[in-house]
Image (cartoon, rainbow, N blue to C red):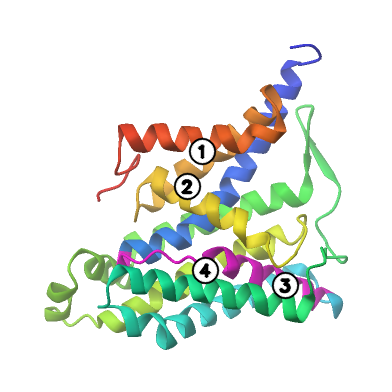
Amino acid sequence: MEGLTTEIVIQTLVSGLLWGCIYALIAIGLTIIFGVMDIVNFAHGEFLMVSMFIVYSLSLLGINPLISLPVAAIALFALGILSYKTLIRRVLDAPMLAQIFVTFGLMIFLRNLAHLIYSADYRSVAVSVFQGRVEVLGIYLSTPQVIAALVAAVMTAAVYWFITKTEMGWALMAVAENKNAASLMGINSERMYALAWGIGAACVGVAGALLANFYYIFPEVGALFGLLAYVVVALGGFGSIQGAFVAGIIIGVTEALAGLLIDPSVKYVIVFSVYVVVVVLRPKGLMGNV
């Protein structure tokens, strides 16, 4: 291919890795909720959008995005628990179709609420401490994207540690494995379900706050990232945090290379083709147990 150099390929690979870390963090929130409750949250992308608008709104007040990030995470944690308490809990034992309609309805509500408050205009955060680019061994990378990827990787590791190394995480895994047996051991499944929704929403809240520093903010922004999160979760294996991380990296790198080597307009065709091939060959995903 004319004009294609080793430096461009390496830069594209690194850029794909950075995007993959962000995709992984978005998907981990989704996979935690599904892993514990077997419910697919169709409003997951809209949770991301809400977080981005929180950061944008605070930036209008001159608040630094570094301060906005924990605010967005806490707000989304509260939104996740509120969604569970007011909506999800009522359809826990209902048919899957009812659960789908509830989360789909929440998606429509949040998206239209954003249209009502902010209109359909594209917006961006004007005040950002993450600006410019960094050079690493001759490779130039966007500073906001590097910071976002590093924070996403640290957040992913922290969630994995919490789930696998703490008593609260073990309780979550026990409820996910067998709700009735966990109840006999004194574990409050209601509290664990609410916690799963809170953690899942907080993860996507952090991802949204990071994205807001270098990506346009508009009411439909959650649609693409939500769809990619479903692909990442299915590819990595439903309920698997490490699977979501690996799948996020695969999707990020595949998207970047497809855009470079084929055409940017068909990069998602390649991404979804990889997903279809893996799911056909291994329906439970790369690291899934279901």
Tag 3 and tag 2, C-beta contact below 8 Å: no
- Could you tell whether 244 is left or right of 269 in the image? left
Q: Amino acid at mark 3?
A: Phe
Q: Could you tell me which residue is drawn at 77 percent across and 55 percent down?
A: 214
Q: Which residue corresponds to mark 4?
A: 43
Report the Cα–Cα distance between label 3 and label 2.
24 Å
- Could you tell whether 152 is left or right of 217 in the image? left
Can residue 62 be seen at all in this image of the molecule? Answer: no
Q: Could you tell me which residue is drawn at 64 percent across and 63 percent down?
A: 208
Q: Position of residue 8 (x, y in %)?
A: 75, 23
Report the Cα–Cα distance between label 3 and label 1.
28 Å
Which of pointers 2 and 1 lies earlier in the amino acid sequence? 2
Tag 2 and tag 1, C-beta contact below 8 Å: yes
Q: Is residue 153 above or below residue 59?
A: above
Residue 190, quarter of picture: bottom left
Magenta stretch, residue numbers = 36-59
Q: Nearer the viewer, residue 75 or 140?
A: 75
Report the Cα–Cα distance between label 2 and label 1.
8 Å
Instruction: Please tell me whether mark 1 sits on a helix, a strand or a loop.
Output: helix
Single out the residue that lies furthest toward the bottom: 86
Tag 4 and tag 1, C-beta contact below 8 Å: no
Q: Which residue corresponds to mark 2?
A: 231
Instruction: Please tell me whether mark 4 sits on a helix, a strand or a loop.
Output: loop
Q: Residue 272's mark? A: 1
Report the Cα–Cα distance between label 3 and label 4.
15 Å
